[in-house]
Image (cartoon, grey):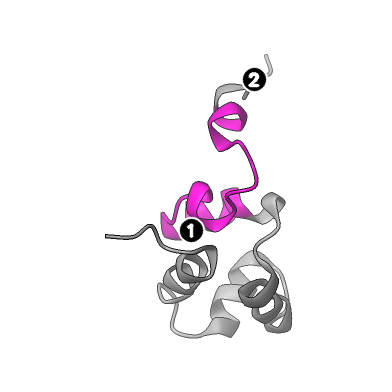
């Protein structure tokens, strides 16, 4: 089975909500922004929140980022 495209991954994330607008509202953006993401891809800064809300992995939403490095470089502030 082929790896889903970023657009497929975003569509999967959106499908976890009743509407595209509900998905956009959960992220604090307008639905038109999400429509643009379907064409142009999800900006990296939104991927972690989408993953938290939908369990669709950042790696699938935006393959241009080295998510293994980002995940491994998280620091704990004390």
Q: Which mark is residue 11?
A: none
Give coordinates of residue 61: x percent, y percent. 54, 57
Give coordinates of residue 51: x percent, y percent. 50, 53
Give coordinates of residue 15: x percent, y percent. 42, 77
Report the magenta residues as a range.
Answer: 47-71
Q: Secondary structure at mark 2?
A: loop
Q: Secondary structure at mark 1?
A: helix
**Picture layout, residue 7 above or below residue 76:** below
Q: Is residue 65 magenta?
A: yes
Give coordinates of residue 36: x percent, y percent. 71, 77
Name the dominant secondary structure of the magenta segment: helix
Q: Is residue 31 magenta?
A: no
Q: Which mark is residue 75?
A: 2
Q: Residue at x 40, y 72 (%)?
A: 16
Image-based side of 77 in relation to 61, left or right: right
Image-based side of 58 in relation to 30, left or right: left
Q: Residue furthest top?
A: 78
Q: Residue furthest front?
A: 2
In depth, the one of 39 and 2 nearer the eye is: 2
Q: Which mark is residue 53?
A: 1
């Amino acid at each position: 089975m082929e790896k889903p495209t970023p657009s497929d991954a975003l569509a999967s994330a959106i499908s976890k909500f009743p509407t595209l607008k509900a998905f956009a509202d959960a992220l604090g953006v307008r639905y038109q922004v999400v429509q643009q993401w379907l064409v142009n891809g999800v900006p990296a800064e939104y991927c972690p929140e989408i993953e938290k809300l939908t369990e669709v992995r950042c790696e699938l939403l935006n393959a241009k980022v080295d998510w293994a490095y980002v995940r491994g470089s998280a620091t704990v502030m004390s």
